[in-house]
Amino acid sequence: MSARLPPLNPLRTFEAAARHLSFTRAARELHVTPGAVSRQVMVLEEFLGARLFERVNREVRLTAVGQRYLDDLREVFDRIAGATHRAMQGTRDKPLHIWCPMTFAMRWLVPRLPAFHAAHPGRDAVFTTSLKPVDFTVHDADVAIRMGQGDWPGVISRFLVGIELVPVCRPRLLQSGPPLKQPRDLAHHTLQQSVARPDYWRIWLEAAGASDIDPDRGLTFESVSLAYQAALEGLGVAMGQHALVADDLAAGRLVAPLGPRVPIDNAFYLIYPERLEHDAHLCTFRDWILAAAQSDEARRASQAG
């Protein structure tokens, strides 16, 4: 037989008190007195048959049971908050919430958004940029762009953009720096990479037959975006994801003096929960972004041919 649910008001009070580690601050948040907070916590402790707080002078601390209980409840509260938000939105015409990696947003998606708004001027969107994998049951997101192999459970996954690795640099570097005509010339240049993608230089160097070059030397940045910006400033050679630097290559802001372009197993995918498969707003964005990606791929294939 399943356990009874605890009384919800004491549960809410416990969460606030545990988060603040203060009955006074919890009372201020809940607009009650500290005494009321203490009484609600006691009700919950009596229900559980366990002490949740240790009261030391004027301070309160979570017991081991209290800490475990709080950890278990946090995900539940996040799910309740997400479900409540979605219920409150109802059928209102709300913006589409898109979850996307920062570099992809800056270097691929945002430059193409004017075309989307020109075609669909009434469609609004809210963007969250994060490398953290989206959880549609917790996060306030309708659709996401994620890098991987497209095999995530519980979501619909559509291939968007493949990833090919290619070294890129500022054109001036070829004029003022050491020669850069073959992969081994990289030994005389500053390599740039990101903490988020630490294996890219190693993968490319091995494919290019230059595995004797140390892939970890040079400049390491927190994000791929910073590594690209450093390349644009002429600091060295960055390992580029071709689709994300294609616009810079076409405009001449960057050049790719070395081959080959090395494909990797991962790619960018558009993902969304099955429950939104027929959502009109999502379908409009999905059809547009897939068409934009296919158009880019066709243009690159034509240029390569």
Image (tube, rainbow, N blue to C red):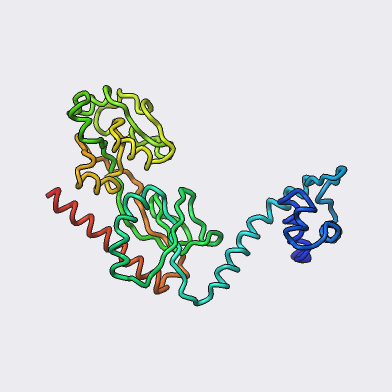
| Total number of numbered discs in the rendering | 0
Tell me if 130 is positioned left or right of 231 in this view.
Answer: right
Above-or-below relation of 48 to 257? below
- Name the residue rendered at 58%, 67% in the picture: 83
Q: Residue furthest left?
A: 305
Q: Quadrant of residue 172?
A: top left
Quadrant in which the N terminus is drawn: bottom right
Instruction: Give residue 234's position: percent from left, percent from top.
Output: 28, 33
Q: Quadrant of residue 151?
A: bottom left
Above-or-below relation of 159 to 131? below
- Name the residue rendered at 39%, 50% in the picture: 147
Instruction: Give residue 82's position: percent from left, percent from top.
Output: 58, 64
- Which one is nearer the viewer's eye here, 65 or 256? 256
Tell me if 6 is positioned left or right of 84 in this view.
Answer: right
Instruction: Give residue 169's position: percent from left, percent from top.
Output: 25, 35
Tell me if 291 is positioned left or right of 46 in this view.
Answer: left
Tell me if 76 is positioned left or right of 291 in this view.
Answer: right
Above-or-below relation of 189 to 84? above
Above-or-below relation of 262 to 74? above
- Name the residue rendered at 79%, 62% in the picture: 32
Instruction: Give residue 274's position: percent from left, percent from top.
Output: 45, 67
- Name the residue rendered at 74%, 51% in the picture: 18
